[in-house]
Image (tube, rainbow, N blue to C red):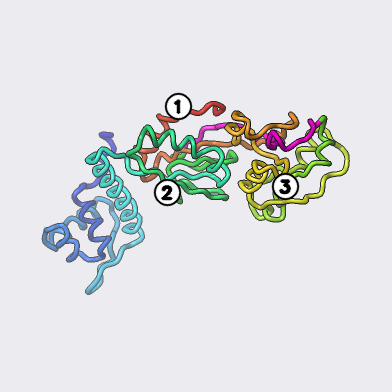
Amino acid sequence: MEKLRRRLPSLTGLVVFEAAARRLSFTSAAREMCITQAAVSRQVRQLEQHLGQALFLREHRSVSLTAAGQRLYEAVGQSLERVAQAVEDIGTGSYGSLTVSATIAFSTFWLMPRLEAFRSEYPQIGIRLMALDREVDLRGENIDVAFISGDEGQGPGVRMQRLFDEAMVPLCTPGFLRAPLNGPADLLDAPLLHLDREHWRYFSWPIVDWADWLEQAGYEGPLPRPRLSFNNYSQLIQAALDGKGIALGCAGMLQDYLADGRLIRPLTPEYRSARGYYLAFNERGANPAGVQLFADWWARAAPAGTA
């Protein structure tokens, strides 16, 4: 830290520079900072000398940022905003709010009860839930915490923790079947609920449907024709909960429904893909203190069935 401080220019100069860059006016920056225009010019000039690069293009009646000036302005602006937020949060005893992302189905069937447990322990922290059926960029979209599928890295500053594997199993309500199923072939006579491959082929996520499950279960006969298909995984599972048929669902995501008996597994074989579900922490986002608090809480109170 001591070496870092030696490399930094004057903090006063950085604050004055931020005001001048934001307003693109030395005169307006001087009024905001309650100093003279000459003092603003002096601070900016000293900062440019320290960096060895011009930060502003000085024209007759206006100034504009150079490429170096724009880069520094973005960094200083973000840093000052984080400091201001931290000061406000400390003063109010708050950790601000957390932006949490997950798919629509994951949010609906797995995440909400666990977020409620966190909120009951930390009611002073706001939660902004983004339910998105697409891949997310935590740093680019200012997301603090995300529950994601797939093991694609998120880059520096994002820590990922594996939750559970993607194990797809047949699911239905206890009263749906009139008689037990003896094997995969018995499924051909049952109403099977499908995901619409035509819809999901436009996404980068490979779906697991009955053809995949039946093949891995050792079935070699004719494949069932989709009679009821959904382009939304949440609707698919809700249809199974409503007694409309048998769906393929992720056992880890639906563990609460299996544990309390709302859903059962009429057959035991499972399709285990190479994908998994992960919890990702953005440690360089807008609220690192809140992210760390959530991470500490998770380590202490991680739900059963997660890594």
Q: Earlier in the sequence, mark 3 or mark 1?
A: 3
Residue depicted at 23% across the width and 53% down the height = 47
Asked if 297 appears above or below 43 in the picture, the reply is above
Q: Quadrant of the N terminus?
A: top left
Q: Mark 3: which secondary structure?
A: strand
Left or right for 111, reference 212: left
Where is residue 198, by image quadrant?
bottom right
Question: Where does label 3 land, which residue?
Answer: 194
Residue 215 position, x and y percent, is 80, 37
User: Disc 2 vs disc 3: which is toward the camera?
Assistant: 3
Farthest-out residue, right: 221
Residue 211 position, x and y percent, is 78, 43
Question: Where does label 2 land, which residue?
Answer: 142
Residue 207 is covered by the magenta coloring: no
Q: Amino acid at mark 3?
A: His
Question: Where does label 1 land, which residue?
Answer: 301
Question: What span is colored magenta in the figure?
Answer: 159-181
